[in-house]
Image (cartoon, coloured by chain):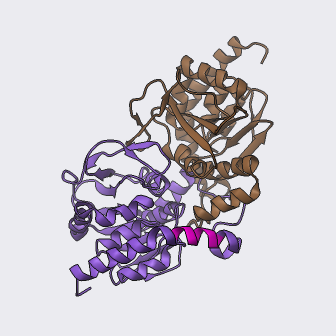
Chain colours: A purple, B brown
Amino acid sequence: MSPGPLRIVVLLFPRVTQLHFTGPAQVFSKFPDTEVHLAWHDLDPITTDAGWCIVPTTTLDACPQADILFVPGGAGAFDMFDDLAALEFLRVQSRKARWITSVCTGSFTLAAAGLLTGYRATSHWASLQMLEHFGVEPTSERVVRDRNRITGAGVTSGIDFAFTLAAELFGDDEARKIQLAIEYDPEPPFDHGSPSKADPEAVKSIIAATENLRMARVRTSASALARAQPSA
Amino acid sequence: MSPGPLRIVVLLFPRVTQLHFTGPAQVFSKFPDTEVHLAWHDLDPITTDAGWCIVPTTTLDACPQADILFVPGGAGAFDMFDDLAALEFLRVQSRKARWITSVCTGSFTLAAAGLLTGYRATSHWASLQMLEHFGVEPTSERVVRDRNRITGAGVTSGIDFAFTLAAELFGDDEARKIQLAIEYDPEPPFDHGSPSKADPEAVKSIIAATENLRMARVRTSASALARAQPSA
C-alpha cells in the first residue's frame, strides 16, 4: 500500500446508478485518514441515472494510485465496454491496488477489463448469470470476496459491501462504530428485496428487460476480450 | 397536488450528509412520472459532507411548487438556522405541499422553520431529544408519520423513509417492485446500528460530540423561533 492516507479511487461515469457509489461513499467518509478520488475523463459534472450530477474530483490521467479500486454499476457500466481508455485505466490501477472492488453491474466493467477472469463474483441478481460470458464464476451472495476482489450484489448491497471492506481494513470494532454513527439498522417496510422473496411475475419482468438491454453487448464484449486475452 | 408530474423538491445545502439525500433519491428515481428538483440559492456545485460535490438543478427563487418537500440533514442542517431565505423558502413551499418530509437532522431545519411545531418527529438518535426545544415531540422510531409530516431517523433510514413514501403515494405493490429492482434486502455484517444494540461507550462518545457541537445553536434558534411565533 502507498504511504500516507488510504486512497480509494472510484471510476465514475455517465448513467452510473448513483446509490452504487453514494451508499459506500457514506461509509468511506468515516474511514480514518482516507482520501476518495472520483475519476473520469474530464472534470465536467457527470449525469447519474437519477438525472442530477456529481462532479468528478480528478481525471483518469491525473488520478493517483488506488489502494482500493472501486467501480459502481448502472446502465453506464455497459457503455464502458467500448471505452478502451477507461478499461486500460482500471487495468493499470489494478496492478498496485490492494483491493479491486465493485457494486452491482460494476462487476461487468471489471470483467470487461479482464480483472475478474477466473474469480468468483456477484452482481445485480437479474444480470448475475451473464458474468459467465467473461469467464467469471457468478456467485449469488450479497457480498463476495475472492482473494483481493470484493464484489457487491444489487444497488443497496453497496452499503453491506462497504462495511465488509471497513472490517477488513480497520477491524470489526471500527466498522461497528461507523454502523452506529450512520444508524445502519435497516427496517425495510416490505420483505421483497430479493428474487427468492419476490412475486415471480415481478422477477420475470425485470429479467426480461435486463436481458433485452444487455445480452447482446455482453456477448460481443466477452468475445472481444477472449480474442485479446486468449490465455484467460 | 399540482397537475402534471409529481414534483419532489429537495433543499440541498453545503455540508449535507449526502446519503440522506442520495438514499431516498434512488427510490425516487423509480417513481412513475416524477421530477426531482434540487434547490439551493445558486447553481454552483454543493460540497457534501463527503467532500465531493452535487450540482443543484434549480434555485430557491426559480423552484417549482413541491408536491413532496424534502429536507436532508447533516452538519449543514444546523447552518440553515441562520439562513432566513432558506427557512422562508420551506415555509412558502410547505403551504401547498402534500407531504413535508425530512431525514436525520433535516428535521431540525424543518423545526427551525416552524414546520414541526406540535408534531411527532424523529431524527438521528444522538440529536433526537433536542427537538423538544422547538416544540416537537421526539419519537424514537425509524420512520415517523404525523398527519402530512414524515420524518426518518439517522442517515440510512432515508431508504426506509422513501419506501414508506412510495407505498403511500403509489401503493404497496409498486413499492415492492422498486424494492426488488434495487435489491433492498439488507444484510449488515454487524448488528450495531442503533444505540440499543451498541456498545455503551460508543453511544456515549457520539452523544458527547453531538451535544458539544449542536446544543448551543439549537437553544438560540429555538428561542428566536419562539419569539417570532409566540402562539406556537
Query: What residue appears at the point 73 percent right and 50 percent down from the top-left corner?
Result: B170
Quadrant that contains the N terminus of chain B: top right
Q: Nearer the viewer, residue A104 or B50?
A: A104
Residue A50, position in %: x, y? Answer: 50, 48
**Quarter-wise, where is residue B71 in the image?**
top right
Position above or below: B56 against A123: above
- The answer to whether A122 appears left or right of B216 in the picture is left
Quadrant that contains the C terminus of chain B: top right
Residue B103, position in %: x, y? Answer: 62, 41
Furthest toward the bottom, the residue is A231
Can residue B140 be seen?
A: no
- The answer to whether A145 appears left or right of B88 in the picture is left
Q: Which residues are magenta?
A: A203-210
Position above or below: B118 against A173: above
Residue A166, position in %: x, y? Answer: 43, 62
Query: What residue appears at the point 35 percent right and 54 percent down from the top-left corner?
Result: A12
Q: Nearer the viewer, residue B213 or A129?
A: A129
Position above or below: B136 against A168: above
> How many marks do you count on the picture?
0
**Quarter-wise, where is residue A69 in the image?**
bottom left
Residue A202, position in %: x, y? Answer: 67, 68
- The answer to whether B184 appears left or right of A189 in the picture is left
- The answer to whether B152 appears left or right of A175 in the picture is right
Q: Which SS type dominates the magenta stretch?
A: helix
Can residue A55 be seen?
A: yes
Query: What residue appears at the point 80 percent right and 36 percent down from the top-left corner?
Result: B147
In the rendered image, residue B212 lying in the magenta stretch gets the answer: no
